[in-house]
Image (cartoon, rainbow, N blue to C red):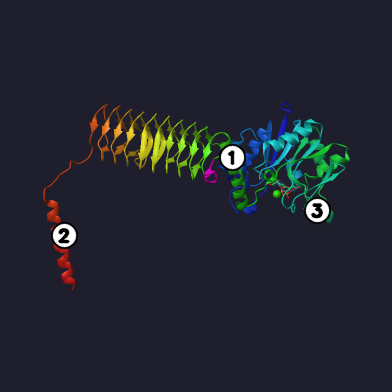
Amino acid sequence: MSQRSCLSVILAAGEGTRMKSAMPKVLHAIAGLPMVAHVVKAAEAAGATGLALVIGHGTEEMRKAAQKFAPKAQTFVQEKRLGTAHAVLAARQAISKGYDDVLVMFGDTPLIDAQALASARQKLAEGAAVAVIGFRPPSPVGYGRLIEKDGRLVAIREEKDCSEDEKKIGFCNAGMMAVAGKHALQLLDKVGNKNAKGEFYLTDIVEIADAEGLDVVATEASFENALGINNRAELAEAEAIWQTRRRREAMLAGVTLIAPETVYFSHDTEIGADTVVEPNVWFGPGVRIAAGAKIHAFSHIEGATIASNCDVGPFARLRPGADLKQKAKVGNFCEVKQATIEEGAKVNHLTYIGDARVGAGANIGAGTITCNYDGYSKFFTDIGEGVFVGSNSSLVAPVTIGKGGYIASGSVITESVPDDALAFGRARQKTIPGKGKELRERFASAAAARKKAAE
Ligand code: UD1
Ligand code: CA
């Protein structure tokens, strides 16, 4: 099948008013990726070689977004929403290029998997002119029904046009279908709008093709595949299903999730075998974790690269550009941004490391802060191999601490420190014998005098 060319036409012209959003519906995200981008990914995984995106609402925003998630897609504007067949025909110019298969998909049905699409394409490879993806929802109300006769699919009837008997059919149209490219335009051009809604229904091509003696078939997919998103409750439902699928996939690939239902993946999270993820961990976009890492509870990680055998959290925050090399450790209440933590270095407690490098084997004490920003620009802190930074130190960038350097705790370091030097950057301690006792007595008698005056 792989040698057959395939155009995916993705319908996304709907307004999506029920989202109650200023943003087009199909740009709302699942696992951090616009739902229409999930549809694009499924199309590509099913072998689509061309992509046509039919838009009609928020066109500029849609075009801009499409450049990111589907740079090769051609966009077509459907000026008036006259129905699904009309929408597909908005992409006439792409269809007329003569693809073997035309795969019609909906931008608001993000959980469709490549397998369901590939099965429909397979039917075309076997000679069908139209292959409709069907499913059996818990309740068929609102869906188009698949009307079969002698084992053939002869029509799809929309709910509003169904007879009482047809309404009893449980096998429904998921909405998506594969159409042989050589028949697509002539079938679509024959679709009229004489129905209850006065729309040009894509589904009518089933009856038209059957009447022409062409082979029309239905394949069956699971309910999830056809889940359409109309409001934010359904968006959350789709997110939950997506996360469940991804967690299972991670576990089957060798990742331990102690409480899988509390771990949230991004669409692009990469995570190696034998990594253990404790409960309540959030992965934002751009995270890559090698094998054998430990991610402790309540960590928030995005845009970070974590090498093998690293130890992260609990309560760690890794922001974009955090790059942890082998066996690095970032402990509780630490934030790392745009910084490399070299092999075996430790940033264990209550620390901010931003725009920095922490050399191999260095030890960063509790409460250390890289002061990387003066309100206008960001500056770099370079901490050499084997450095020891005492607790509660401020490293004011730009600053370099040479290999083997030693920073006394409580220091404010504003000048670079050479290799193997000891640096203090704090006031010297003064100790006055007996002064503590004297102060205490003075304060106590002042308090007693005030109390007496108030009586
Ligand atoms: C459609 C199917 C129905 C199926 C159901 C599954 C038709 C006629 N009906 O019905 O059989 O059971 O999906 O969810 O195809 N769109 C446009 N331009 C238009 C009209 C629609 O881009 O002019 C897009 C919408 O944005 C949406 C998709 O096409 O993404 C489906 O349209 P919608 O109106 O939701 O179709 P349904 O009535 O749900
Ligand atoms: Ca719909």
Query: Bounds of the magenta span?
Result: 259-265
Residue 330 appears in the picture as rendered: yes
Question: How many numbered marks are there?
Answer: 3
Please rate how many residues cluster around mark 3, counting C-alpha atoms within 10 Å: few if below 14, some from 14 to 19, many from 20. Answer: few
Q: Who comes first in sequence, dot 3 or dot 2? A: 3
Q: Which residue is mark 1?
A: 248
Q: Counting other residues with Cα less than 10 Å from the Cα at mark 2, is it few (<14), some (14-19), or many (20 or more)?
A: few
- Say what amino acid the circle numbered 2 marks: Phe
The answer to whether one can see residue 60 in this image is no
Q: Measured from the top left, where is residue 254 in percent x and y? A: 55, 34
Report the Cα–Cα distance between label 2 and label 1.
Answer: 65 Å
Amino acid type, residue under disc 1 in the picture: Arg
Closest to the observer: 3 or 218?
218
Q: Secondary structure at mark 3?
A: loop
On whether ligand 1 comes within 8 Å of the CB at mark 2, the answer is no
Q: Residue furthest bottom?
A: 455
Report x, y in % for residue 196: 80, 54
330 falls in the magenta region: no
Residue 144, relative to residue 69: is it above or below?
below
